[in-house]
Amino acid sequence: MEKKINYLSRTFADIKDELIKFSNQYYPEVADDFTDSSIGAWFIDLVSAVGDDLSYHTDRMYQETNINSANLRSTLLNLARTNGVKIPGAKCSMCEVELSCVLPVDGDTTATDGSIAEPNWNYAPIVQRTSLFSAGSTNFELTEDVNFAEQFNSNGFSNRKIIPSRDSNGNVTGYTVSKSTIAINGTTKVYKKVLTAADVKPFMEVVLPEANVTNVESIIFKETSDITRSPEIYEYYIDAEEYRLSSEAVMTYRYFETDSLADQYRFGMVTRYDDEVIRNIYNPHVYEDYTELTKLGTKRTSRYYRGEWKPLTQKFITEYTDNGYLKVIFGASNGYGVLPEYMSTFGDYMASNLINNDMLGVLPKEGWSMYILYRVGGGALTNLGSGSINTIANADVDWGGHEANTSGSERGKVLGSLSITNLSTALAGKDAPSNEEIKYLIKYNTSAQNRAVTVKDYKVKLMQMPPKYGAPFRNTVIEANNKIEMSFLGLDADGQLDSALPQLLAENVVEYMSNYRQINDYIEVKSGRIYNIGVEVDLFVDKNYNTADVIGNVINAVKDYFDVRNHDMGEDIFVGDLEKQIALTDGVISLISLKIFKIWNGGYSPDKCPLPTIVEGSVCDSLQNTIFTVGNGAEVEQIDLDQIDRVLYGDYNSMYEIKFPKSDIQIRCKVR
């Protein structure tokens, strides 16, 4: 008979009982006293304690191998790295801010020769992104330089407004110029290090010295250790792997962050170079301006930069250590290997493939100066209300080279008038992911693929294209006639739908998707359709309410319901929901009728809504008695809502819009 104990015994008490039974059964002559004061009890307690401890640690080790039962953060981070999941740190909040300053007048404000005074743009400051703004102890920085002399931001969107200030005689005394932009929580810092031979090795790692780093903005290297000045902030954002400033004799190398060191391309801007020298602080991009025809003539409203997929060898990835520090990891190849002499052509080719293999990125060289620009901040506590950011902690201002022909005292006045406020609430701030969040990130990462297979994949990847290369306001993607068809609609300067499709935007979309589409997919980009409509409402209004206020509230309800920002392309619009909102408006006794009209041509979209209309001369037509009118040579027909179950059905590539709410929403009311 085999001597053994019950292997299901895992606790101290169970193991002790099993050992006592084992001793009594097989060795009764050795010890028959197992009281607490006996020597036998002492030995059994020792063995039971060892068994209990081993069982505990075995359970813990197995527990940490299973994602559902793992508790240690270090274990979850290791599982994430094994599965290729990048775990983020704390996220910074962001908001839209408005910077304002008062510029002096350029010209005679009392001139009678027809000349018009303008702001003196020589005094327009350039507030650099390194400027620091605060709300109490919470700091915010700009995401781009704000040039008051430019009508557009770096993404090509118009973001400037000008308001004249007048004295008691009506003369212009100055201009308040405001620019809106995005501010992000945190403070940017620079980590500098001169690389030694011990530092440069495959998959070189650099751990940043602070625990609350949210991300790395950029990394550049100067090919010398003798640097007498710190790099300017613009140098970190020049969109090139290698460049040389006109003021320096050494090359600068920029490294780009990727999701994986195996990534071979990045989507960047097409740039102009003159012998790889950047001759001024503004990166010379290739772009096209988009103009619109207005009543005052042609107006430039946006700018699209030309993008392309660029080969990428200078790259790095980031990951957080178990104790919360951000680690930067570079590639594996030195990229500068010297081949042996007197080799054959084939031998030279094979040796080059081995020595200079840069598929996983190249390393910097010994003696180079490394500069890592990173951001510190983030967390849920950085979410603030609108108007909270109102203090300029440090204004880093450049005058665009106009110091020689401007007055120092006048520049001081402009700088003193500089103010800031956040137009929107600061949101999206978030603490580092909890252990439970990390578990879900790991679980659902396996099914994600960085490629476009379904039409939903195309839509998601399109939304990830950087906005500086063109960002459609609404888009839809379908598969038609064995091709991927993308339809876009934009917004003009007045916030109205625009079906005009810039050629550069279409080219950028095709180029961007070429890296994700299936090899046999053909992509066609086209403009969407805009169906302009008008609304006529008949009401009974309570005589105890101000009729004008009730009409205004109903107009706002209709305008908000049809606001294009609340709908997507191809979305059906239920008229019944609008009727409920109107009926619930204060002062409205009852809704008599609601009619919707299709409008096209003239000053409206040329696209005619295909929904059925009430035939002129029919019984329904004789009962309508409508007086809905439009101008500008537009055509109008009433939609037969009863025939379509009071639902405005949308085509996959279309949107409904009330183009001119002041005239296209017409209210008639009876007071009782």
Image: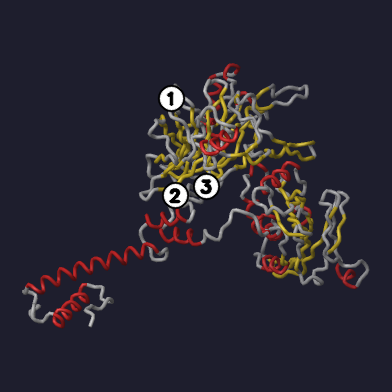
Q: Callout 3, which amino acid?
A: Ser
Q: Which residue is mark 2?
A: 90
**Dot placed on the residue nearer the N-terminal end, 1 or 3:** 1
Q: Find the distance from the CA under tag 1 to the CA under tag 3.
A: 29 Å
Q: How many marks?
A: 3
Q: Which secondary structure, mark 1? A: loop
- Quarter where residue 309 is shown: top right
The vertical placement of 399 against 69, above or below, is above
Q: Is residue 400 above or below residue 191?
A: above
Query: Quick check: marks 1 and 3 in contact, CB under 8 Å?
Result: no
Kind of residue at disc 2: Ala
Q: Nearer the viewer, mark 1 or mark 2?
A: 1
Residue 345 in the figure: left or right of residue 496 = left
Residue farthest right in this picture: 617
Quadrant showing the N terminus: bottom left
Q: Position of residue 378 (x, y in %)?
A: 44, 47
Q: Identify the residue shown where x is 80% and y is 72%.
A: 642
Identify the residue position indicated by label 3 in the image: 260
The residue at which mark 1 appears reads as 225
